[in-house]
Image: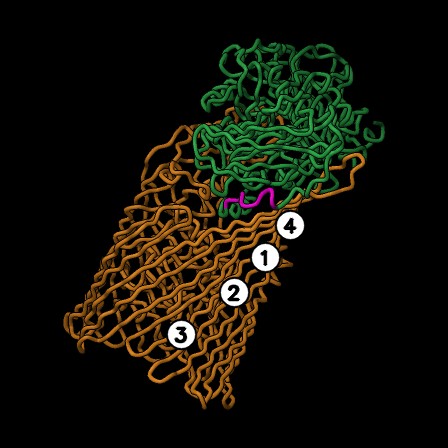
Chain colours: A green, B orange
Amino acid sequence: MPHRLARLTLLFGTLVVGAAQAQTTVLEGEVPEDGGAFFTVPFTVARGTVELAVRHDDLSSANILDWGLIDARGTFRGWGGGNGEQAVIGRLAASRSYLPGTLPTGQWQVLVGKAQLASRPARYRVEIEARSSPTLSAQDRASYTAAAPLEATARWYAGDLHVHSLESGDARPGLDEIATFTRARGLDFVAVSDHNTSSHYDFISPTQARHPKVLLVPSVEFTTYAGHLNAFGASEFVPFWLGRDGVTLTSALQAFDQQGAIATINHPTLDLGSFCIGCAWQQPVYPSLMRAIEIGVGGWDETGALFDESAIAYWEALADQGVHLTAVGGSDDHRAGVGLNQTQSPIGSPTTLLYATELSVAGLTRALREGRAVVKLRGPDDPFVSLSSLTPLPRAGDTLVGTSAQVLAHVTGGEGATLEWVENGVVVDEVQVTSDPFTHERTFTVPDGRSGRLRAALRIGASPRTVTSHLWLAPDSPPGPPITAAKPSAKGCQGCTSADATLVALLSLLVLTRRRA
Amino acid sequence: MTAALLAMLLSQAGVPRDAAGTWADPARTAFLVPGSRAILSGFSPASFDGLQPAASAVRFDGVLLRLPAHGFLGPTTLPASWLDGVQVSQAAGSAEDGRTLGRSLTLLPRASPREGWHGSVRLDVLSTGLSLSGVVPETKTQVLAAARFFTAPALGASLFKVRALLGDWQLRVAQPLGDGELRVLALGAANDVALTVSGIPLTARIVSQLVDARWTQGALEVGLTGSHDSIALAIRGAQTRNDVIGGEQALTARAAWRPMVTSELQLSVGGDASLRRLVVSRATQSALPPLPGVDPTLASTSSRSELGPAFTGGVFFEASDRAGPFRWSAGLRGDLWKPVDAQAMASLDPRIGFERDLGDAWTLLASAGLRHQPASWLVPVPVLDTASWRFGLQQAVVGDVTARFRPTTAHHLEARGFGTSLRRSVELSPFDDTFLPQVNLSAEDVARRTGTGFAGGGSIAWAFTPTTTLWVRASYSLVSSWRTLSITRFGGDGLPRGEAQATVPWAFDQTHLLQGATGWRFGNGWSLGATVTVQSGAPLIGGLYGQGQREGVDAITRAPRWVPLDRDLVGNASPWLRVDGRVSKVWRPGALELEAYLDVQNLSLWAQPTGTSYGVAPATLAEQARGDVTLTTRPASSPLGFPIPVLGLEARL
């Protein structure tokens, strides 16, 4: 953009670094106020460049800028977000969050996101070092190919749908550590959902080969400054710079949908200002392109006690409007369970169970699409409850076609717990779980021409433990207009608060670790 | 046995009121007691004998104060005009004194006028308060009433972007009836704080209210206390609002009978029982995102959990001989706790104490006993304390020996040694980095945070009162405190490498504390006072004082970085010195007494060191990229590095 270029102060210098010939270009300027949440800083890559190192600085403790690269062909080359270290891109290797490959000559762009501009005028500084010989060793990367099913049994598979690797700037673990910890918690799968990049896809297949007992699912946390969503099963890059170059939320959702990925609204009520930039969902909801929502926002003992109930209410309120979303949970682990502070959840807290015919990415995405999901809010050791229809009705996705169904709740590991039946967001019955296993039936009926939804939940004492997704009932498929439900209400959550836990969970906001988008 | 050095040191007429550095608050002379120290310089309440402040119960007029300090760490919730000082028990204390591990504090009431009506108005930069006292001649009803509003936070609003409204009120009515007396005491304190953290408005409201009725007749005393404490927090985000209110209601009945069996032997028998009900209400509101064809709406939740009743009760029996050269007491108390949704716990605490006069000048005092307390949270926190009963009891064997030498009426010299063996400790803190997990402790977590330990030390104190217008006090104390518990060991990359049992210095360990205080009243109404405190630094084990670091290497960038030291390898913060000064002038025009005072805490401009701030030297991006990073340190200290002048005027009629 010429007007942005006009604002740039171009400083120029040449440095010789070691034996490698290197030319360093310094670009310093003012962050444009207009133009949306992103802007670019162009620079030229000359012939003979085999490796680029890009260093950046937001020159302020109050402002936060995110950083990425687009090459001369307009190809996305990585997004480090708030990475503190330099980005290095070579032909055979790249630093974390970035993609190796040939370095086309011409005009590249540093893509900059305005995560937080608290001090104005905001300035930036970028140093680009063009190297004629590489410094990085070749890496064990491979294009992602879906693994063959690890297991061909139809059953409930346990996993975590929201985990970050070191390819996210604010995370540390490699995929081997993630796979090992996931297995140690007894889980079957884990979705690696790094922020806005695709560099982690290159490591999934090699790592999968070393960990045949845990399915590594490609995903991405599509991180905007007004909401985050996961694309479970996505293995190709989708532009995230909303409002620039024609990128919109719908275009991104369509691109994910075309890959067969499941778009999931993440931590919808995690509204923590600059502690967690853009974490609460403020974007529009597109029911036909969004299939799931996180109701387990970190483990109950960490952040879930504060955010799960509001996320469940949010989910129910959307369901009142006829939006079908499958309930899932995500730990949002950035450490593979190691060295967590008081608000960070380990992989598996919460645990999401998906009923799939096989342990494969295709099998799991199908389960999500059909709403066959149960969330254990604390972790794998929580009791389990699943719903099934005893009435032989045709099923389309998450919806039984009919007006009345006899539904069976099957509880395991839940003796002493309370089973709650929740119809259209309202708790309509509570049953003591007196044995293991335990079953309880309920007749679910909807008025003619209307649809309705039923789910089950388990709580132990005052603490909620397990939540099923909705089982919808509608006379036709696709479902008709929703019935008018009670507001997603107090009654729905009556007594599901652990007194001291919630009280102090709120206090814990004072000590929450600041997170980047 | 309650005879203690403090009574001699501080409760002489006028001494607590003239002590410098107390914000003109006699209760804060607790910081002058040998063996005591502040969590942070200037913050209440005091820590005694290497234990958490929460280990010391604070009582006034026979009633336990649930919120002795505003905002947990601030000024006392009782008005200065009601107090004449503070008295601290010996280590074992009386058998009447239970459910805490440490020494108890008794706030000493100021003598009430026997006739007529009197009032005082106090206006200083901290607070504005009114107090009224008097006796209704016809009924001989004694009335004390006071109210106070804190003005200092209003100044803070502009200085620190924090809005705070603090206040307290008190009413005490005593009515002789026949041979007995009925006394009703009502206390209330409220704290409202609003601030913005990272753009998120946060408000907190802490309210404590109590009404106590007591009937005394001869050796008999019965009482009934009702209290309501609440903590409310609200956070308003861009899209959401969260409200949590925790309330605790308690009803306590007590009775004691203290007959003199002979002219020397006194028995004390009694007990109490308390029912508590906890209620936690929570509400959330989230704005739903735009949805085609749907009106904007809110997703909301509300819940109300009623937990209770929790029950605690205790009985005690004590015999004491308080006459003659050998005075002794022996007692036993038993306590029972029934937490909500957890098993009941019981304890049995034997206590003994004696005083032995050795000639005219020497007295030897000693006490020993067993004490129990549920898991504690650094300072007393209503709601949370009761909810934490389920973490089990702490247990300590305590004892102390004191030698007192009084060669003349002007000179008092005391030496005291103490030891506290913690057989089980569960000392939690909101300042620890594991705060939230501590609240939701599983059985494994409880085991991990449960330790054993020891606190021991001693003090030497000298009091010199040559005239009624001059007093000098000086003391030295050493407090060593450590715990054996599970700690995390860190690798060179700063990541945990595992857990290990280790003995670590505790927050109140290795404190050398040297203190001197003096006051001089001149004949013309002027008086001067000064207090000097020299204290060694606290161990840097994390939490309140930060954790020591060492140089390591970042696992990803390979650049140098600071990584935590294992908690058994940390050092101490630097020592510090504080000088406080006080000057006052009294006028007595007729029946009116006017006092202007200036009490300045920290004239020395020396903030208490809290460890080290670890950083990285400025480097160019290229240097950072090469890992050419220089790690830096600079001293870190408490925010109170400036003088706190309390300039005030008090009028008494």
* Residue B478 position within the rendered picture, expressed as x and y whole percent measured from the top left: 31, 54
Q: Main secondary structure of the magenta part?
A: loop
Question: What residue is shown at x 39% (from left), y 32% (from top)?
Answer: B489
Tell me, yes or no, whether the highlighted magenta stretch contains residue A495.
Answer: yes
Tell me, yes or no, whether the highlighted magenta stretch contains residue B12.
Answer: no
Residue A15 seen: no
Q: Chain of mark 1?
A: B
Callouts 3 and 2 on one subunit: yes
Work out whether mark 4 precedes mark 2 in sequence or the reverse, and give the earlier one. Answer: 2
Residue type at tag 2: Ala
Q: Chain of mark 3?
A: B
Residue type at tag 1: Val
The residue where tag 2 is placed is B189
The residue where tag 1 is placed is B193
User: The magenta stretch spans which residues?
Assistant: A491-498
Q: Which mark is residue B201?
A: 4
* Residue B399 position within the rendered picture, expressed as x and y whole percent measured from the top left: 24, 56
Residue type at tag 4: Pro
Q: Is residue A121 left or right of residue B460?
A: right
Helix, strand or loop for disc 1: strand
The residue where tag 3 is placed is B109
The correct choice, above or below, for B344 with respect to A470 in the image is: below
